[in-house]
Image (spheres, grey):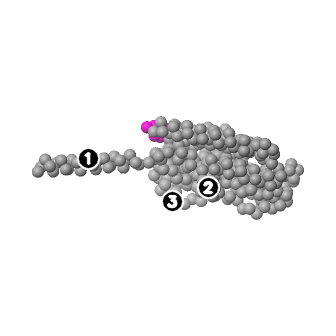
Amino acid sequence: MISQWLSRFCGLMLGVVLLAGEAHAEEKIYIVTSLPDLADIAARIGGDLVTVESLAKGIEDPHGVPIKPSFVPKLNRAQVLIVMGLEYEHSWIPALVTESRNSKIVKGNSGYIDVSLKVTPKEVPTDLSRAKGELHPAGNPHFNLDPEGGRLIAQTIAEGLTLNFPQHRATFEANLKVFLAQLNAKIRDWEILARPLHGVKFISYHQDFTYFADRFGMDYVGTIELKPGIEPTASHLVELMQNMKTVGAKIVLREPHFSEKVPNQIAAQVGGLVVKLPIMVGGSPEVKTYFDLIEYNIRELLKAAQVAGVAGKV
C-alpha cells in the first residue's frame, strides 16, 4: 500500500512540476511601445515569444498623447519599453516611466530601446528657443514614414531584444530577416508605384512628411504651423498661400489629429484639395500594419495628385 501511495504521490508531483514548467515556458515577454508602428514591428520581430501593447493610438497626436491611469501599471510590468526617440515623446513618456517605478525601462538601461539610434535626423534646429518651436528639438522624429526608417527601427528592436533576452537571439534574427525581405520587396514596389509623385508639390499641417517626401521625390513647400508646435499667424498663412500659388502646389496634407478648418480654407484659396493622411498605424481604419501605412499614404497621394492634375507620368 505504501509503495502504491508513494508511486501515486510521485506521479502527481511530477505532473505538477511538468504543468508548472509548461506555464513558465508559455510566459511571453511583455513589451510596451510608445507608438503603434513600433508595436507592429516589435510583434513581427518577437513573434510568438512576445506580447506587445502600444500606449498611443494611431489617431492621437504622438507629441502629446493623453495620459491614462492604465499606462502606469503597464509600464510597471513591462520588460521592455520601445520609443521613437529624438524627443518625440518628451511631453509624456519620461513622466510615466518615473511614475511606473520600473528601473528596467529607465532611459540608459537595457530595457529602454530607442529606435532612433541608427537614424541620421533631418532638420536639426540651430536655435532651440521657445519662439522657434519645441516639438523637434533633436531633429525631425517622423522617420517612420520613410520605409528605410522602418528598416532601421526593425534592426534596432532586434538588437535591443537580443540584448535583453540573448537566449532568443536566433529567433529574433530569423524574424528580422523575414521582415527585411518583405520590406525590401515592398520598397521596390512602392518606388515604382510612387513615380508619378516625383516633383509633386505639397504642404502639410505639421512637419512630419519630410522623410516620406525625400524618399519618394516629392517637393515639400511648407507647413501650416509656423514652426513645429507653433500655430500659424495670419501673415504666415498669407505668405504660405502665395507661395503655393507661385509654385503651383495643390495638395494640402492633414494629419488625423488636426482640425480640417484651416487646411480646407487654404485648399479653397489655391484651388487645391485636402488629403487626410495617417502618420501612424491605426491612423485610418485601413491602416492596420506598418506596411499598410506606407502603401495607404502613397495610394491616397496618387489619387489626390491625379484629381488635382499635378501627377507626373511613369
The residue sitting at 21% across, 47% down in the picture is 10
Residue 264 at x, y percent in the picture: 78, 61
Left or right of residue 138: residue 249: right
Q: CA distance from mark 2 to mark 3?
A: 20 Å
Disc 3 marks a residue whose amino acid type is: Ser
The numbered dot on residue 70 is 3
Q: Residue furthest left?
A: 1
Q: Nearer the viewer, residue 181 or 16?
A: 181
The residue sitting at 52% across, 61% down in the picture is 69
Q: CA distance from mark 2 to mark 1?
A: 47 Å
Q: Magenta residues, as a range?
A: 162-167
Asked whether residue 67 is drawn in magenta, I would say no
Mark 2: give few (<14), some (14-19) or many (20+) Cα within 10 Å: many
Q: CA distance from mark 3 to mark 1?
A: 39 Å
Q: Nearer the viewer, residue 144 or 239?
A: 144
Q: Main secondary structure of the magenta part?
A: helix
Residue 276, by quadrant, is bottom right
Q: Secondary structure at mark 2?
A: loop
| Residue position for label 2 | 282
